[in-house]
Amino acid sequence: MNTSLTARHGLSDRALAWMFVLPTVILLLAFNIFPLLWTIYLSFTNFRANRPNLDVDWVGFSNYTRVLNDEAVWGHMQATAHFLCWSITLQILIGFGLALLLNRRFRSHSFWSTAILLPMMLAPAVVGTFWKYFFEPQYGIFNYIVGLLGGPKDFTMLGDGDLSPWAIVLVDTWMWAPYVMLLLLAGLRSIPPYLYEAAEIDRASEWTKFWRVTLPMVMPFIVLAVLFRAIENFKMFDLVDQLTNGGPGSITELASISLKREAFEKWRTGYASALAIILFVSIYGMSMVAVRFLDRVKQR
Amino acid sequence: MNNKIRHPLEPSVASKWFAAFAVIGYAIVSLIPLVWIVTTSLRTPQDAISYPPKLVAEVSAIGYVNLFTTRSRVGAEEMADLPPPTTWYEKIVRDQQMILAGPSRFLDRYANSLMIGFGSTLLSVVLGTLAAYAFSRFRVPAKDDLLFFILSTRMMPPIAVAIPIYLMFRAVNLTDTHVGLMLLYTVVNLSLSVWLLKGFMDEIPREYEEAAMVDGYTRLQAFFKVVLPQASTGIATTAIFCLIFAWNEYAFALLLTSGKAQTSPPFIPTIIGEGGLDWPAMAAGTTLFLLPVLFFTILLRKHLLRGVTFGAVRK
């Protein structure tokens, strides 16, 4: 009925659908798919972007085997894994804790939740710059506060190889624990009250209610939060680039930082392209799982 | 005695107090960095590096003056020969044993951020609105795959995308141009804009347009006169999210611009400049850069969840 209506006036729905979708698809093809294909091509060559006039040779899979056999790459992967595991664990713990507390709906809870959310929306690169100031060992406020709380004062958060991996975890957690809080708060609010009423009738303890009702019902949201944070932090660039720039040495050289160094400082474009493809495939795998969970959460 | 009967699911008064105490404590601690950066912008360079850090310090406009100017150092004798400063900011510059050399590039970079931010936002919202409407109302072939493809473009690490984009831009002379960065941000934001807007469009009842079409509107007229006004909140929300993303973006800006079209995020860290200790100027730049985002975040608070989950979770 609908189609016959529009057929009489003006454009058909079909034509309109194409007209509306095509510009988006074309732009995405030009700026995403074409570059992706180009990267795949480059990853099989010895091209160097700073010497565009040099002959380009086809090198087969040698870039890939070099990436996978490179000990430095495994070091970067370990740094990335350390960063991912700890930042996500802390963000889930803090975010879930805050969400549970906010869900008690004390007076002014919405004001304070907005206040907590502010860091999440800031530019990570700029955040990295001003945290560098807080971490200054001579006059930084971070060392000062740690000292006030009875800790040591003479440590350099960013210059010390043992501490700098924790510096990036700390700042990332400060920025993104609110994100987990926001997502899990929505999870908590989606739990139908009758489940708690039923538990109440069964005289379940608070502890039992948490393990048997709250946690299982929030679980899909927790998984979603973990996946979202994992994807974002796997790509992590701006914050760490400003905060440590991979240093000291290459202790905090996460995947994206090493990609920048290979591609835009050492100009090993072919090698960097192979690394980029490997990273992309890993993230793509994670995103597929994330999208499935999105659908599941959506149904609630 | 309090004889009001508490609903069994309502948290007890004590637990509410505990929750409020813990949450407010966390909020205050997590806001210290923001408050500290804003106050640092109003300090003198000496106070900014004093130890122990001063909770209360002399208020000074040096940070802002240094942010907007370039200065050069002159000797004491030369300084004595100069005519007295004519403006309040020139006086601040003189007090640092320097003379005014000219304006800094901060305003240019800020203007670039604004121009590229608004331009790309406009484009991605217009294109996103059209695509979202089509995905929401029409039968599009392979709709779910297409939507997933659109979302997946957001998952690529920017540095990985930057390698070929860098070569592409070099080939067509888009490196360090406003148009280049604007197009790039438009594309990056398209995924968010399509997904968010599709969610908003799905919430508008089809009956509205169908009624309008029965009254003789074409589909296109119904879209412009019925659907768009209904979707205005969604469109505004989406626009703000796109704007914040473009405003905050760093990786592409760092690698694809160097001067003319450089935006604020890669520029702000370079302010610290001379001696590496001009933290008040850096803090001033940061403050001016962050304020619009803070304002918009507060404006958006009801829609934040939706925005950061690509419209998947709506509360």
Image (spheres, coloured by chain):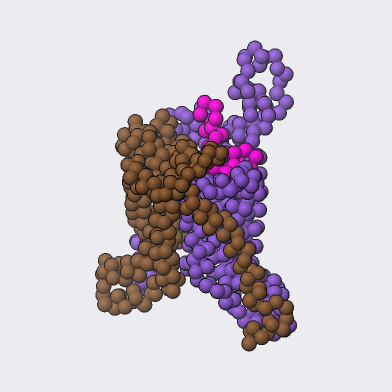
Q: Position of residue A103 (x, y in %)?
A: 40, 64
The residue positioned 53% from the left and 58% from the top of the image is: A33
Q: Which residues are magenta?
A: B253-279
Pick the front one: B181 or A145: B181
Residue at 62% over, 38% down? B259
Give the mark count: 0
Query: Where B312 sits versus A94, above or below?
Result: below
Seen from this angle, which residue lies furthest top? B77
Q: Give coordinates of residue A106: x percent, y percent.
A: 42, 62
- From the rendered image, report the letter of the chain displayed in purple: B
* Relative to A104, B307 lies left or right: right
Query: Is-magenta flag for residue B258?
Result: yes
Pick the front one: B111 or B256: B256
Front-most of residues B260 and B94 = B260
Residue A220 within the magenta-colored segment of the rendering = no
The image position of residue A197, as x and y in percent, is: 34, 76
> Is residue A189 positioned above or below A35 on the image?
below
Residue farthest to the bottom, as pictured: A1
Residue B153: tell me if it is visible: yes
Residue at 28% from the left image edge and 67% from the top image edge = A211
Give left or right: position of A256 versus B266: left
Chain A, hue in figure: brown
Front residue of this view, candidates A250 and A208: A250
Asked if residue B203 shows in the view, the reply is: no
